[in-house]
Image (tube, rainbow, N blue to C red):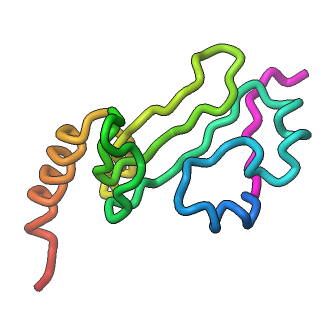
Amino acid sequence: EFQAPAIVLSQMNRNMQNDNYRLPIMADLKESSGIEQVCTSIYFVHRVDPMIKQYFDENGELKNEGQTLFVCAKSRFAPTGIYQSWFVGACKRFLKERRDAEKLEEEVIQNCKPYLTN
C-alpha cells in the first residue's frame, strides 16, 4: 500500500554456535518459514574472523582476510551467492576491494593525526 521497503531483523538459532563457524543459511533464522514466505530477499551479513582459516580452504576462491560477507540466501530479482566487502570503521562504509578499504583507512588516519592527543 505504501510502496516502501521493510527490513526485518531476526534472531539466529543457537545451534549455529555449535557448527564451527559455518556460513549462515535460512534454516538458522528463528521462524524461518514465515520470514521466507513474505520476503523477496534474504541477506546475511557475516563477519569473517581472520583467525579462522577454514572458510574456503585449498581450492576455494575466497581467501580469509577478515572481510565481511553478504550472503544472499534468497532473492527474486538478483542472483544468490556470496558477495565480499571490507568494512572501513572510521567512515562506516563497506567497499568492494580490500586495497580501497586500506587506502581509505590510511587517509582517515592521516587526516585525523592533528586532532589526536597523546
Q: Residue at x 14, y 81 (%)?
A: 117
Query: In the rendered view, does 81 fall on the left or right side of 55?
Result: right
Q: Quadrant of the C terminus?
A: bottom left
Decide which of 111, 48 is in the foreground and name it: 48
Query: In the rendered view, does 27 fall on the left or right side of 83?
Result: right
Query: In the rendered view, does 25 fall on the left or right side of 112?
Result: right
Q: Residue at x 13, y 53 (%)?
A: 106
**Stretch of the chain drawn in magenta:** 1-11
**Magenta stretch containing residue 4, yes or no?**
yes
Q: Quadrant of the N terminus?
A: top right
Work out which residue is located at the far front of the displayed protein and give it. Answer: 58
Decide which of 63, 38 is in the foreground and name it: 63
**Count of marks, rendered view:** 0
Q: Residue at x 55, y 46 (%)?
A: 45
Q: Where is residue 55 drawn, in percent x and y?
A: 42, 49
Q: Residue at x 51, y 39 (%)?
A: 70
Work out which residue is located at the far bottom of the displayed protein and give it. Answer: 118
Q: Where is residue 28 drawn, in percent x and y?
A: 73, 51
**Magenta stretch containing residue 16, yes or no?**
no
Q: Where is residue 77 drawn, in percent x and y?
A: 66, 14
Decide which of 51, 11 is in the foreground and name it: 51
Query: In the rendered view, does 113 fall on the left or right side of 91?
Result: left
Decide which of 41, 114 is in the foreground and name it: 41
Q: Where is residue 34 drawn, in percent x and y?
A: 91, 40
Q: Main secondary structure of the magenta part?
A: loop
In the image, residue 39 sits, relative to residue 116, either above or below, namely: above
